[in-house]
Image: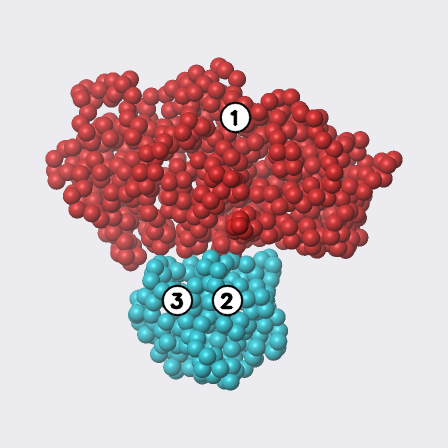
Chain colours: A cyan, B red
């Protein structure tokens, strides 16, 4: 499987995502530069963490205007798998590919620590290899990860089984402990925790691999 | 502003053969400032060891470089940003991080780790507590802002509190990068006729005279110097990093240097001086953020995120293309000449012309008087030390104190795991990052102790080096090289200069002994406010190497394991107890001398623990440091496993539990005999203290009396230790 890892100016987890896919999972990964209008022949796309364009405005607010995001939108409309991690999640909500917003952490401070999240649904290409209720220990590292949406949106997300993962120990004040959600068609997911930082046995946890492995599995079955 | 001394002005006249103009005077003033020229310390810095088989580049470049094998190398250095962090904590600390990161990547290395040694006045100081809390919060937010956005993990450091830092906080930042031997670049303007190219942020009026500000004492007027503090843009720095490394890979870059202290002035004359060439630039071509800047302002600006590079003539376009891709300014502002002079023009008119070598390397050197005893803030004689009424309460008080409590509140604001190399982040004895390409890992420890050094700068400095090397050994790494940050008061006072000289000699002795040459560093003098100097505070950053493997951490892992003390219980007399945390926190006193150190014995303990770890015998390993054995034991219980121990010691309980004698490492193991064998072979003591168990930490006296000294639930210890800093930062308002 070929993963495209988008590089915005200011992305800083691009290399980590590339390494997790190529070295920890043994699949192909290629970088896609932000002013590219095509995703090449990628089977799936990762929007990595970082501070795209510095994020001096709202996180992701500039990135949504970059040429590559037009290609990402088109890719998503055609059913392609798009995973947004951290800043990638922020960009997905700013782009309207996912509902809601990511506000400053409740305590107004950046937080980096391992958190435990629970997989709430396996009905997604990002969790199909997991079991429902499975716990993952993965790090978060963000200043603006407090998931917010109005009540109707939150109810709809729950009713449509689109809350993919929830924090057990909410680090940022996210409403209803939401750590990750997917799109209506379920092919776009945003999550604040970093699965690519929990993909190597040396780093203390390999729980994050399940997200990437699920993507591979669902692509394989789609190709079959 | 500190100006040129009359004798210095005379030297300038001699070099130029005429009166300097205003721009030239400004250029000499910053280049010959203490900060840039090390004029008070340089004679003594020569005493430091700087060579070993691994040292590829020693002091004098932007960072030292060490060979780590398989064609790879690491570049690292520590630098201070003390003065700016007092005036404007957030930007002062942020630009401190930015500055040291540029020092690393200007050599061609990609930064992979940052550690910070930060010191403040006490958070509960009756007069300055409010301000100290605000400074700490600002400094931490600044480090977090810059490092997190840039994308380098902040993996460790230390935080300490003393009243002497009330008016003079210390912010020392260590950074380390990795690259291949064939990717090393130098700040040299080689090749006559080659273009000199300015890249990165535009030049503004910020930071003018920052270097001279950092070379003067604080007075009431210092607060008005806020405009002298630069503003950092970590996003710009990230782009600069990627663009510089990409430009270096084109092969068209001849030399490169960042514009740090003294900005364009320092980078031009140093690059010319190192290559023994001249550099001619025209300021009209320098990208400027503000209009109407004078040559003086442009040359002295310390605007951040700028680099100067020299490219091969005819290949400029390759360099420009890279910077265009990253959206950065890159402009040819001049060329390398053969006359050895820094020639600055403004729209073609010469506004300064100074020989590079004399400017960069011929700053006056001062042999400042130091033939008096170093200043000591405390008596030598021990007071009557009262018998403790409650050793449990003493331990809890220590665990809740600023110096010893968990610094989690601080380091959770730092991205510690970006780049997926962090095997051990903050909270361990040493930080460990792996090098993905080589199968080796780099361990790092930064350490200072103003209290020890105030009692004896020489002994204190030796203890620091020993402590850093012990921290590295406690995670299984072999120490290989060091950098130091010398934070002192006004060197024009002989009793302060004597502290500096003694500390440098102490570092030198210890670094020779532990085979950790100094490859670079920083000297920060004039750390005084309203005539009150900080305690002598050298900070060491030492780097070790090890095979990549899951880290051995400090926490006890399983019940029923044997707890051992490698190195033995150590000993202490009342004089040597006066610099301990117990004396500070519980007795509220300070006296005597720091703990005694036997460097030969210390080194043998290091070998023993490294051997035990390499053989997989240690389930946990923790250096006994500040706070002594009881504090180290309490920290080892932080993940919920306690221990039942007895100390067979003739010392009174306060000494046995809390003395800070060096050369000791706590180990838990299921193979005590094997560790005892290693200890015997290394000719060091090794005691079995007891066994690990659920829920409680119990420490008793193993001799005839069988008293219980400590008995406490481990979750209580942990709660006190982990929440103390947050409590200190948000005190309950009185009334």
- Mark 2 or 1, closer to the camera: 2
Compared with residue A2, is residue B649 higher up or lower down, i.e. above or below?
above
The furthest residue to the top: B371
What residue is disc 3 on? A6
Q: Compare residues A94 and B277 and report the one nearer the observer.
A: A94
Mark 2–mark 1 distance (CA, rounded to whole Å): 48 Å
Dot 3: few (<14), some (14–19), or many (≥20) neighbours within 10 Å? Answer: many
Q: Are marks 3 and 2 on the same chain?
A: yes
Mark 1–mark 3 distance (CA, rounded to whole Å): 50 Å
Q: Which numbered disc flags the more N-terminal residue, 3 or 2? A: 3
What residue is disc 2 on? A173
The residue positioned 46% from the left and 49% from the top of the image is B137
Q: Quadrant of the N terminus of chain B?
A: top left
Say which chain tag 2 marks: A
On residue B503, which mark appears?
1
The residue positioned 73% from the left and 36% from the top of the image is B388
Mark 3–mark 2 distance (CA, rounded to whole Å): 28 Å
Q: Are marks 1 and 3 on the same chain?
A: no
Left or right for B541, reference B404:
left
Q: Where is residue A91 in the image (x, y as percent from the top left)?
A: 39, 69
């Amino acid at each position: 499987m070929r993963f495209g890892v988008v590089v915005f100016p200011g992305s800083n987890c691009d290399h980590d995502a590339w390494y997790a896919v190529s070295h920890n999972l043994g699949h192909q990964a290629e970088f896609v530069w932000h002013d590219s209008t095509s995703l090449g022949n990628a089977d799936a796309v990762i929007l990595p963490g970082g501070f795209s364009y510095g994020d001096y405005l709202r996180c992701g607010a500039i990135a949504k205007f970059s040429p590559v995001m037009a290609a990402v939108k088109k890719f998503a409309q055609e059913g392609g798998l798009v995973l947004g991690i951290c800043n990638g999640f922020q960009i997905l909500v700013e782009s309207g590919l996912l509902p809601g917003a990511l506000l400053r952490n409740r305590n107004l401070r950046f937080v980096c620590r391992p958190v435990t999240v629970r997989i709430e649904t396996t009905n997604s290409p990002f969790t199909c290899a997991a079991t429902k209720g499975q716990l993952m220990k993965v790090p978060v590292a963000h200043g603006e990860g407090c998931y917010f949406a109005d009540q109707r949106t939150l109810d709809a997300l729950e009713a449509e089984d689109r809350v993919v993962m929830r924090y057990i120990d909410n680090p940022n004040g996210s409403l209803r402990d939401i750590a990750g959600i997917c799109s209506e068609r379920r092919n776009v997911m945003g999550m604040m925790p970093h699965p690519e930082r929990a993909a190597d046995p040396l780093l203390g946890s390999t729980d994050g691999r399940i997200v990437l492995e699920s993507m591979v599995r669902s692509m394989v079955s789609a190709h079959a | 502003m500190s100006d040129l001394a009359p004798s210095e002005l005379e030297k300038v006249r001699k070099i130029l053969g005429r009166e300097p103009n205003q721009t030239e005077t400004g250029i000499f003033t910053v280049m010959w400032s203490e900060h840039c020229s090390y004029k008070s310390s340089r004679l003594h810095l020569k005493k430091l060891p700087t060579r070993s088989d691994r040292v590829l580049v020693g002091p004098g470049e932007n960072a030292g470089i060490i060979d780590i094998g398989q064609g790879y190398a690491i570049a690292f250095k520590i630098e201070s940003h003390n003065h700016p962090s007092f005036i404007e904590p957030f930007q002062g600390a942020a630009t401190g991080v930015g500055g040291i990161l540029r020092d690393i990547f200007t050599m061609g290395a990609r930064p992979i780790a940052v550690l910070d040694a930060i010191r403040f006045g006490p958070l509960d100081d009756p007069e300055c507590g409010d301000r100290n809390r605000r400074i700490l919060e600002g400094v931490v937010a600044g480090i977090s802002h810059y490092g997190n956005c840039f994308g380098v993990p902040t993996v460790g450091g230390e935080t300490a509190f003393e009243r002497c830092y009330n008016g003079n906080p210390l912010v020392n930042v260590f950074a380390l990068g990795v690259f291949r031997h064939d990717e090393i670049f130098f700040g040299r303007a080689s090749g006559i006729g080659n273009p000199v190219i300015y890249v990165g942020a535009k030049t503004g009026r910020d930071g003018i005279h920052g270097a001279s500000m950092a070379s003067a004492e604080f007075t009431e007027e210092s607060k008005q110097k806020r405009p002298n503090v630069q503003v950092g843009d970590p996003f710009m720095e990230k782009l600069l990093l990627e663009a510089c490394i990409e430009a270096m890979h084109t092969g068209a870059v001849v030399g490169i240097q960042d514009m740090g202290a003294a900005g364009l002035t320092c980078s031009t004359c140093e690059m010319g001086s190192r290559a023994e060439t001249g550099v001619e630039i025209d300021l009209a071509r320098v990208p400027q953020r503000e209009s109407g800047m004078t040559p003086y302002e442009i040359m002295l600006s310390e605007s951040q995120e700028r680099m100067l590079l020299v490219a091969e003539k005819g290949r400029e376009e390759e360099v420009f293309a890279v910077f265009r891709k990253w959206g950065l300014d890159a402009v040819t502002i001049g060329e390398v000449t053969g006359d050895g002079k820094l020639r600055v023009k403004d729209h073609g008119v010469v506004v300064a012309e100074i020989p590079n070598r004399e400017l960069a390397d011929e700053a006056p050197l001062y042999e400042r008087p130091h033939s008096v005893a170093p200043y000591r803030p405390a008596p030598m004689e021990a007071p009557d030390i009262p018998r403790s009424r409650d050793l449990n309460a003493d331990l809890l008080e220590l665990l809740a104190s600023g110096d010893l409590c968990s610094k989690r509140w601080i380091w959770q604001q730092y991205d510690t795991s970006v780049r997926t190399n962090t095997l051990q982040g903050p909270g361990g004895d040493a930080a460990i990052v792996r090098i993905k390409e080589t199968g080796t890992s780099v361990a790092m420890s930064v350490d200072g102790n103003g209290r020890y050094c105030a009692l004896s700068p020489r002994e204190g400095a030796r203890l620091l080096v020993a402590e850093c090397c012990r921290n590295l050994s406690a995670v299984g790494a072999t120490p290989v090289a060091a950098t130091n940050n010398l934070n002192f008061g006004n060197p024009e006072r002989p009793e302060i200069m004597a502290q500096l000289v003694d500390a440098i000699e102490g570092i030198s002795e210890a670094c020779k002994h532990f085979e950790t040459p100094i490859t670079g560093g920083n000297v920060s003098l004039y750390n005084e406010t309203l005539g009150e100097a900080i305690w002598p505070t050298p900070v060491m950053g030492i780097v070790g190497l090890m095979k990549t493997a899951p880290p051995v951490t400090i926490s006890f892992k399983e019940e029923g394991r044997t707890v051992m003390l490698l190195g033995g219980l150590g000993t202490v007399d009342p004089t040597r107890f006066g610099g301990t945390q117990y004396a500070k926190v519980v007795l509220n006193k300070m006296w005597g001398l720091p703990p005694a150190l036997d460097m030969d014995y210390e080194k043998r303990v290091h070998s023993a623990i490294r051997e035990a770890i390499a053989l997989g015998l240690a389930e946990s390993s923790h250096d006994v440091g500040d706070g002594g054995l009881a504090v180290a034991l309490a920290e080892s219980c932080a993940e919920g496993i306690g221990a039942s121990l007895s100390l067979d010691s003739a010392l009174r309980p306060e000494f046995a539990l809390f003395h800070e004698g060096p050369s000791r490492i706590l180990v838990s193991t299921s193979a005590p005999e094997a560790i005892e064998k290693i200890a015997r072979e290394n000719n060091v003591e090794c005691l079995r203290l007891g066994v690990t168990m659920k829920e409680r930490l119990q420490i008793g006296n193993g001799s005839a009396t069988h008293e219980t000294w400590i008995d406490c639930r481990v979750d209580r210890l942990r709660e006190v230790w982990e929440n103390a800093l947050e409590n200190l930062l948000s005190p309950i308002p009185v009334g």
